[in-house]
Image (tube, grey):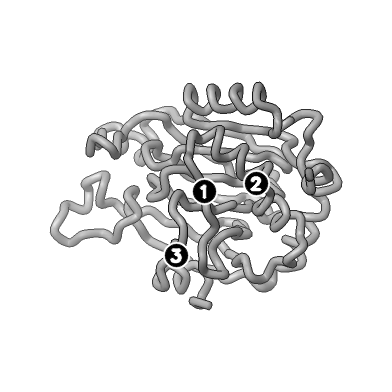
């Protein structure tokens, strides 16, 4: 039974069709990035945006200083080292447990059709939700001046839904080179040039209702500061390749201001 037919724009994105799945798998293998614009139906986008807007005052805001590898700055390493320079990331976050259990986001996240699509496109054996009640679906709010600093992800893949793009600023920028985590290789000179603004980067304009799959562990990326009074609202759909995984208590406290 397809319980997400009113959520996903199947006319444009038939995510239950094997040929479409193979096409998406090929695209992300070639580009390390898959952008599916108008993934949501207009009706579902409106419903999700209304829920996100209604929860905005419950968002927990935090500012983090981190290196591109998401570490703290080390006093034992030169502060000018590109792997030790501090980046700034600040945003608000609403955790999973505040979403309506029957919301479109919950239906999509737990849908077998959607999960099979994700597994097949990313060539994964299986995917699982977080076992804690906060971390599986997160609503992220970037207010004026807020940003996501340059970094590599710890997770091997990221899945996001753009609900409300910022009219100005809040652009997704990235490069598809510079690191191979499997071989413990990293191009420090390239990263230094990116951070200093001396090298051109890829820019991605993301419209409302767009689903993005991205391999962020090996590709440096950021979100530029939001310049408008309209917040940038982005949903992250977080899965694990192993079962019974929970986000660490320290991370939950950092991002949500609580652990349960």
Q: Is residue 98 above or below residue 213?
A: below
Choose top left, top right, bottom left or bottom right for residue 120. top right
Q: Position of residue 245 (x, y in %)?
A: 44, 62
- Residue at the left extreme of this rendering: 76
For label 3, the residue is: 247
Q: Looking at the image, do the residues carrying marks 1 and 2 touch, with CB atoms under 8 Å apart?
A: no
Q: Looking at the image, do the residues carrying marks 2 and 3 touch, with CB atoms under 8 Å apart?
A: no
Question: CA separation, marks 1 and 2?
Answer: 18 Å
- Residue at the front extreme of this rendering: 1
The tag on residue 127 is: 1
Q: What element does badge 1 sit on?
A: loop
Question: CA separation, marks 1 and 3?
Answer: 15 Å
- State left or right for residue 8 relative to residue 168: right
Q: Earlier in the sequence, mark 1 or mark 3?
A: 1
Choose top left, top right, bottom left or bottom right for residue 115. top right
Q: What element does badge 2 sit on?
A: strand
Q: Looking at the image, do the residues carrying marks 1 and 3 touch, with CB atoms under 8 Å apart?
A: no
Question: CA separation, marks 2 and 3?
Answer: 20 Å
Residue placed most toward the observer, 47 or 65 = 47
Q: Is residue 151 above or below residue 134?
A: above
For label 2, the residue is: 161
Residue positioned 56% across, 45% down in the render: 159
Q: Residues within 10 Å of mark 3 (few under 14, many from 20)?
A: some
Q: Is residue 259 above or below residue 92?
A: below
User: Can residue 164 be seen here?
Assistant: yes
- State left or right for residue 143 relative to residue 68: right
Figure quadrant of the N terminus: top right
Residue positioned 58% across, 52% down in the render: 236
Q: Earlier in the sequence, mark 2 or mark 3?
A: 2
Depth check, mark 2 against mark 3: the one in front is 3
């Amino acid at each position: 039974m397809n319980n997400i037919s009113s959520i996903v724009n199947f006319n444009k994105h038939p995510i239950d069709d094997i040929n479409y799945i193979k096409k998406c798998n090929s695209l992300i293998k070639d580009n390390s990035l898959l952008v599916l614009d108008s993934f949501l139906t207009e009706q579902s986008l409106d419903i999700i945006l209304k829920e996100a807007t209604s929860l905005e005052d419950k968002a927990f805001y935090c500012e983090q200083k981190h290196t591109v590898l998401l570490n703290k700055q080390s006093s034992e390493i030169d502060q000018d080292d590109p792997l030790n320079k501090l980046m700034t990331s600040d945003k608000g976050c609403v955790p999973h447990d505040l979403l309506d259990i029957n919301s479109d986001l919950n239906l999509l996240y737990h849908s077998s059709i959607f999960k099979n699509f994700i597994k097949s496109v990313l060539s994964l054996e299986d995917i699982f939700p977080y076992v804690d009640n906060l971390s599986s679906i997160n609503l992220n709010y970037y207010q004026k001046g807020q940003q996501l600093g340059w970094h590599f992800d710890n997770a091997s893949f990221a899945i996001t839904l753009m609900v409300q793009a910022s009219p100005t600023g809040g652009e997704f920028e990235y490069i598809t080179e510079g690191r191979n985590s499997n071989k413990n290789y990293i191009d420090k000179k390239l990263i230094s040039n990116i951070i200093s603004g001396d090298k051109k980067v890829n820019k991605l304009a993301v419209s409302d209702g767009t689903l993005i799959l991205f391999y962020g562990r090996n590709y440096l990326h950021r979100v530029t500061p939001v310049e408008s009074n309209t917040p940038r609202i982005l949903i992250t759909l977080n899965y694990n390749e192993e079962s019974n995984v929970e986000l660490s208590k320290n991370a939950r406290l950092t991002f949500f201001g609580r652990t349960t």
